[in-house]
Amino acid sequence: KEKGLNLIKTLCLFAVYLFYTPIISQILNVFGLTDENIIMFVADLLFLISIVILYKKSLRDNWYSFRKDYSWKKKIGVITKWIAIFFICNMAMGLLTELLFPSAANEVVENTSVLSGLKLGYTVFKTIIFATIAEELLFKKSIRDVIENKWLFILVSGIVYTAMNFMYSDFSNPYIFVDVLVYLIPAFIFSYAYVKNNDNIIV
């Protein structure tokens, strides 16, 4: 029963994640608000608040566990280790791309071009606050609540995260699969880091 409820909750969260921006946009347009940056900020903020409220108990428990089980030295060590692994993998992917597909280096990942067109304040919120809280809860916590097997979770979480980022991409681009790998490899790394640290979302 609990598994079934978790599955329904996760599916509902992903449905909301897919459609909340256009819905909020329509509502705000009725009140004469048409600024795209403000609309996206309000929509993202509402989703962020909602998912934090939904998982507040888990967040609180994970925070207490993080404070209790990790000394300052261990906190810094764990975070530094996973950031280093992430950067090494990113550099390796960049080098591989340069060697195998030199023309792909001039291609801009679609997400990057979208972010470059946004106002600085919203970009900072989207990348540093929204992505690290709302999206981690969505792509890690909610999926992990449904999938117990750690390797299956890593696979599903990584693929779903990458698919969401490329949902509206142009797949006729010959280098699209290189861009996909740039998202997929870090997604697998962070999903592995999540299970390696006892499913503690704070880490």
Image: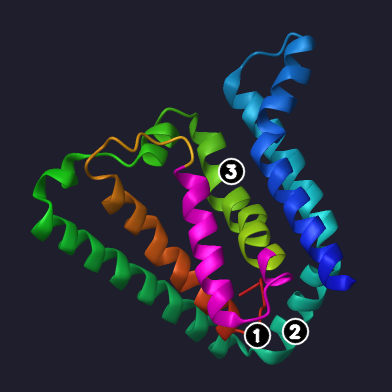
Does dot 1 land on a helix, a strand or a loop? loop
Quadrant assignment for the C terminus: bottom right
Relative image position of residue 138 (x, y in whole percent): 67, 57
**From mark 3 to mark 2, how far is it between C-alphas?**
27 Å
Relative image position of residue 14 (x, y in whole percent): 69, 49
* Amino acid found under the numbered disc labelled 2: Ser
Q: Residues within 10 Å of mark 1 (few under 14, many from 20)?
A: few
First to last magenta residue range = 143-166
Q: Which mark is residue 125?
A: 3
The answer to whether marks 2 and 1 mark residues whose Cβ atoms lie closer than 8 Å is yes
Does label 2 or label 1 sit earlier along the sequence?
Answer: 2
149 is within the stretch colored magenta = yes
* Amino acid found under the numbered disc labelled 3: Phe
Q: Specify whether 99 is left or right of 58.
A: left
- Nearer to the camera, 180 or 129: 180
Q: Residue furthest right?
A: 1
Q: Is residue 106 above or below residue 24?
A: below
Relative image position of residue 186 (x, y in whole percent): 41, 65
Q: Specify whether 63 is left or right of 79.
A: right
Q: Specify whether 19 is left or right of 174.
A: right
Query: What residue sits 61% from the left and 51% below the top?
Result: 129
* Amino acid found under the numbered disc labelled 1: Asn
Nearer mark to the viewer, of 1 and 3: 1
Does label 3 or label 2 sit earlier along the sequence?
Answer: 2
Quadrant assignment for the N terminus: bottom right
Query: What residue sits 46% from the left and 35% below the top?
Result: 168
Q: Which mark is residue 176?
A: none
Report the residue marked by disc 2. Answer: 65
